[in-house]
Amino acid sequence: MAAQSLLKSGIRKRIGTGTNTLVWVDPWIPSTPARPAIPCGASFNPSLRVVDLLDPATRKWNLERLRELVNSGDITLIRSLRPTTTPRAPSYLWNLTKSGVYSVKSGYELAMATSEAAEPNLVIEPRITCLQAKVWKLKTTKKIKHFIWQALTNCIPVCNALSDRHCGNDRSFPRCGADAETSNHLLFECPPSVQAWALADIPHAPGSFPCNSIYSNLDYVLWRAHERGIPDSLLTAVPWVIWYIWKARNDKAFNGKDTTPLETIQLAKAEAESWRLAQICDRTGSVCSTDASWHKEDNYSGGGMVLTTEDEMTIYGSFASNQVLTPLHAEFQTLLWAMKSSIQLDHTVMTFETDCLQLVNLLEEDDEDKWPSLLAEFDEFHLIRSMFTFCSISFISRSLNFRADHLAKRARTRGQSFSHVNSKLPGWMAPMANLLEAS
């Protein structure tokens, strides 16, 4: 209850199909903070619903009705929203995150921004935020990324931590008998762990590795070791070494099984190589690269695609539409447009590529609850994907996606809505034709 005013200032009502959202009452306009729409006249119907602003046949915004009823400044914001076609229970979004899900960080920032005065003489302590952020960029499995992140945040259930949380009385390490089992001792200072790192050919660095700081040790083996000239062929297995040291500890603690350091390293290297090979997959059918272009100050967002068919024919596509809420919305909208274009061209065995890793991860997780602001896009994605015989979404680097990027940027800067899909580039792309066709 004490935080009620804070929450109210940060929420926005999701319009859904529009049947349960009142235009002049509910905070549905994606401004900061969210608010009801502003009428363009003194007289208005207080019971008007968002569904009344939609064309009943197309389920798109009725521009004539919007201009008649709503303040012109709100129309661009309204057109960035996408109504759903599937009825859902009314719900609210958190307006201060792209996903629409509340986060402690954004709530804290809002509270600080609205407080009357910040506490003076704040002491800024060392932060491990950058180190934590790098964990999610590691080339390894999600479970190992999560484990390493837990190690950095002191969340591994080692005996010392469990005892601190009154979940046990024994602090000693079950593997080597040390007085206190800490995360750092487990992974780097325990004799079997020291031997494992030596067998992994990660050289000691006096004063840096190993040391009594979990942060310094992880920073060294995951990043600084590369700067010191240790070859990538040795470092690629490091996340698995960390994981299998943990597994060996658990085998000893719960099964009474002793795993030698050599076995730990052999398992780690084998799993690292298996994962690497699993990432190398043959392309199936046609391949379509997509990219979006979004700028906060523009009224339009753009999208581009380069579709290469099985018989090596190249099809170019670009489009521009009304501005959407965020760059991620634009990337998702571009992917949906490319998928629909592929279906229309009768290509139903497709690999789609994008340089938006966030979108790829989002679709892999397939968890709509984490991004309520994208529910309409998810609905459309599932419908269109069902029309393909085979459909995969993969990540490519931005340097390999420059053709779709050029198409998207030029489309956005045209300043009008349009869609073009053809084996020939449109006339307005003439300056870029040689670059795109020669690549």
Image (cartoon, grey):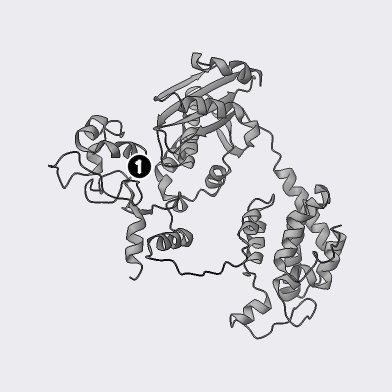
State the quadrant of the C terminus: top right
Q: Name the residue at 26% across, 35% down.
A: 72
Q: Is residue 375 visible?
A: yes
Image x and y of residue 63, in percent: 27, 31
Quarter occupied by residue 269: bottom right
Q: Compared with residue 210, is residue 94 higher up or lower down, i.e. above or below?
A: above
Q: Compared with residue 62, is residue 252 higher up or lower down, i.e. above or below?
A: below
Location of mark 1 (residue): 84
Of the pair 329 and 91, the residue shown nearer to us: 329
Q: Name the residue at 61% across, 29% down.
A: 402
> Seen in the image, is 203 located left or right of residue 314?
right
Q: Name the residue at 49% across, 51% down.
A: 367
Image x and y of residue 153, in percent: 62, 67
Three-letter residue code for mark 1: Thr
State the quadrant of the N terminus: bottom left
Of the pair 408 and 114, the residue shown nearer to us: 114
Of the pair 425 and 431, the residue shown nearer to us: 431
Neighbours of disc 1 within 10 Å: few (<14), some (14-19), many (20+): many
* Element at label 1: loop
Question: Which residue sits furthest bottom?
Answer: 169
